[in-house]
Amino acid sequence: MVLEKQFVDFILDGRLEDIPQEPVGVIKDMIMNNLGAIVGGATSEGCGTVLNMAKEWGGKEEATVLIYGDRMPAHNAALVNSTMARALDIDDHMPPGMHIGGSALPVALAAAELAGGCSGKEFLAGLVLGFDMAIRINSASTYNGFDPSGVCGIFASIAAGGKILRLNPEQMWSALALGFNRPIQTFQSIVDGTTAVRVGQGLISQAAISCIQMAQKGITGPKNFLEGVYGYFHLYAGDKYDPQAITAGLGETFQLDKVSFKIYPSCGNTISSTDAILGLMDEQGLTPENVAGINVRITPYAHHMVGGQFKIGNNPRVDAQFSVQYCVANALLRKESLIHHFDESYIKDPRITELVKKIHVAPDPSLEGGRQGLSLRADMDVATTQGDTYHISIPIPSGFPGNPLSKEKIIKRFKEAAHYGGKPVPEDNLEKITLFVDTLEKAENVCDLIPLMLSSHK
């Protein structure tokens, strides 16, 4: 139980004053990005259904559904808010596909309301520490098709929410252990193009709050949830892990520089391919008319999720978000990749159908890194109607470690998302939200953010 105790102590003893500015800055960017995603995603397919179901379930009015303003049990408010956060697929993430903030932020907000308020310092500390724990565990994990957002990302949500609710050591230990037993999801939801992707993010949050509350009431989880004979590292690392490497510098150095922010509203495995076609368009003046064919090579891991033949099923946005063919065709046709380009009318544009026929995507094992899912490299060859062939390789896509987005681009994405969807917040609130997040460590009560995140549209 060495690792378990180290992480529990790390979460409960950590203070914002002892955390460097860099990881705090990442969390502020995460908050901005996800608040925009929630506004933009509020009216996306499935979100209203989840909200209406939660309203039908009823219960104590503990926490707020952002944008809509409904009050309901905290675990259900977190379910709805997280579903909205993931709907546009622009929330933060990291290889091999772990989405943390889309659940951790809604859980932290729900916990703050349950606690009757929370200072900005406590809020930021909980999120930084929770993220760091999940990132460290993720570094040793091998998921083999399980979705790391539910397998590992839930630890960040429970740690942040539990710290805000001031769990004692025994309670925090049990809450994290209960989380180990909670939502297991797989990437089959992505492969089959389902809204289970966004709802799954909500289920992680719902489970996180439930685990925290059960632990508060004395429900216990397996003490050896990480290192036990059937613990996390047996199931998701094949018992091949280095405890010293996982906890190296714990509490002194933080690993939030591994968090990525998307410049385009699609799966992280499509970003490098979109970068590639936009780069060649800029360099060589490519247009839909003078492109004869495009060959894209990506890792086998990425190909399983986003390399298949593009076809429109029951959920066109999901189909497009997780298709290299669509993302490349869209960027070539529209010279950029914006949220509204993944609306059904854009997806069904006949010009896209014709361009997709020119795009071939193949798996290339030589592009895979030392650990499956870490490499997001894409190599692209474009043949023109004039007989020329152009090559480009994108080893690190925009927004990923080594090629990060600027704060200005994070704010630009926030505003793009906030102007999308059917229930925007008042325009005056956008600058207020930006300032609130930027100075969050000075906030007396983070719950003061919630009224700014309510739509004026009924």
Image (cartoon, rainbow, N blue to C red):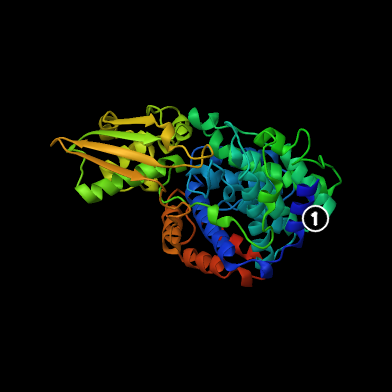
327 vs 227, left or right, is left
Query: In this rendering, does residue 60 appear at all?
Result: yes
Residue appearing at x 49%, y 38% in the figure:
45
What quarter of the picture does the N terminus occupy?
top right
- Outermost left residue: 386
- Given the current orientation, which residue lies at the most extreme right position? 218
**Horizontal relation, residue 291 to residue 228: left or right:** left
Looking at the image, residue 308 lies above or below residue 111: above
Where residue 428 appears, as percent x and y from the top left, is 47, 66
- Decide: few, some or many residues near mark 1? Use Cα within 10 Å; few <14, some 14-19, many ≥20: many
Q: Can residue 316 be seen in this view?
A: no
Determine the image quadrant of residue 114.
Answer: bottom right
Find numbered disc 1 in the image and state the secondary structure of the residue it sits on: loop
Query: Residue at coordinates 68% horizontally, 45% vertically from top-left?
Result: 242
In the depicted structure, whether residue 16 falls above or below residue 395:
below
- Comparing 234 with 194, the one in front is 234
Q: Where is residue 47 in the image (x, y as percent from the top left)?
A: 54, 41
Q: Based on the displayed image, in which of its 4 quarters is residue 415 positioned?
A: bottom left
Q: Name the residue under label 1.
A: 167
Type of amino acid under label 1: Leu
Residue 206 locus on image (x, y percent): 68, 43
